Amino acid sequence: MLLMQSCLRIGILCFLLIGAVHADQTREYWISAEKAVWDYAPGGKNLIQPKMGLGVWGETRAYNKYRYFAYTDASYSTKIKQPEWMGILGPQLTGEVGDTLKVHFKNMADRPLSMHPHGLRYNEDNDGADLRGAGGIVEPGRSYTYIWQLDDKAGPGPNDASSIVWVYHSHVNAVEEVYAGLIGTIVVTAKGMAKSPQDPSPKDIDHSFTTMFMVFDEEDGEEGGLMHSMNGYIFGNLKGIEATQGDRVRWHLIGMGSEVDLHTAHWHGETVLNGGRRTDVINLMPATMTSVTMEVSNPGTWLYHCHVSDHITAGMITRWQIQAKN
């Protein structure tokens, strides 16, 4: 009898231990590409220095673009609303090491497009870039389901934070399509660090924000069409970046663009840890992806911007807020 009770206790313990480790998930997404109009300063003004105005960058604020959108299911009838701070970025795909991303892509635009991920594991048909593969080109009105694996090499390395960021973008004509707005992000959490099977965000973080620094060229090099943006916004029109005193925040930083896109992301009011190194400036080059951690402690409304001098002048600057803890 005692032996049976002991075995039962061991069995329950093993069940609990096994249950504590999240089983690998297949995470399913329904993503479209669609034509859209994008306004780089929807507030209609320079929200950092109102008296300075928007300069030549305000002469035309809205341009025809293409964007990725997420839907709730295969009917593509209900869009999923994104946080305000995400701006022009496409839906953020998330998972834990060991998971599979099953991405149903529907081209609802008027040109051939695709989805190509950085950093993940896939076969040739799911590369989304090389036109020889089945998913390398998706014609207007057609669909393709991409299968991407979040293996160990897609997840955080030994000196990384508990989650890291990758990008995905259209790659039929990659340069033109990224400038058009067809870019989004993928966040991979380290094995065992997800909050729950349903929520793969890291359990050691309270909030995360993603910022893409890129100069969108809207007018073939004309100064007024060089939109020095953060998530597609200029002169403080990027809003919604808020945290509370005591929070741990993960910042995912993206650099994209051309040789002019040497960026230095800088926070006022706080510092971050980057692989164990303390700093308040992160260097970004085109196609650079960096994830850093901040322990928020200093209440206030703070500037956040690229520290390259002419990028500040052209509007690559906004504000973020730390609420005092009650």
Image (cartoon, grey):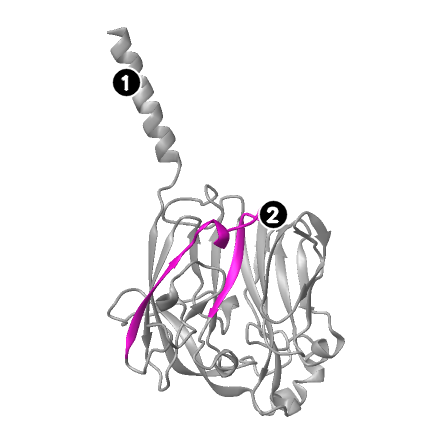
Number of marks:
2
Looking at the image, which residue sits at the far right? Answer: 309
The answer to whether residue 194 is left or right of residue 269 is: left
Identify the residue under disc 2: 325
Q: Position of residue 66 (x, y in %)?
A: 43, 81
Mark 1, other Cα within 10 Å: few <14 / some 14–19 / many ≥20 = few
Residue type at the position of mark 2: Lys
Residue 155 against residue 110 in the figure, above or below? above
The answer to whether residue 216 is left or right of residue 112 is: right
Identify the residue under disc 1: 8
- Mark-to-mark CA distance, 1 and 2: 47 Å
> Residue drawn 47% across and 49% down?
152
Label 1 sits on a secondary structure element that is: helix
> Residue drawn 40% across and 61% down?
122
The magenta stretch spans which residues?
142-168
Q: Position of residue 108 (x, y in %)?
A: 32, 80
Q: Earlier in the sequence, mark 1 or mark 2?
A: 1
Q: Is residue 85 visible?
A: yes
Of residue 17 and residue 85, the one placed in the foreground of this image is: 17
Of residue 237 and residue 309, the one placed in the foreground of this image is: 309
Q: Quadrant of the N terminus?
A: top left
Q: Does the segment drawn in magenta span residue 99?
A: no
Q: Is residue 80 visible?
A: no
Of residue 62 and residue 311, the one placed in the foreground of this image is: 311
Residue 310 against residue 125 in the figure, above or below? below
Label 2 sits on a secondary structure element that is: loop
Mark 2, other Cα within 10 Å: few <14 / some 14–19 / many ≥20 = few
Quarter of the figure with residue 77: bottom left
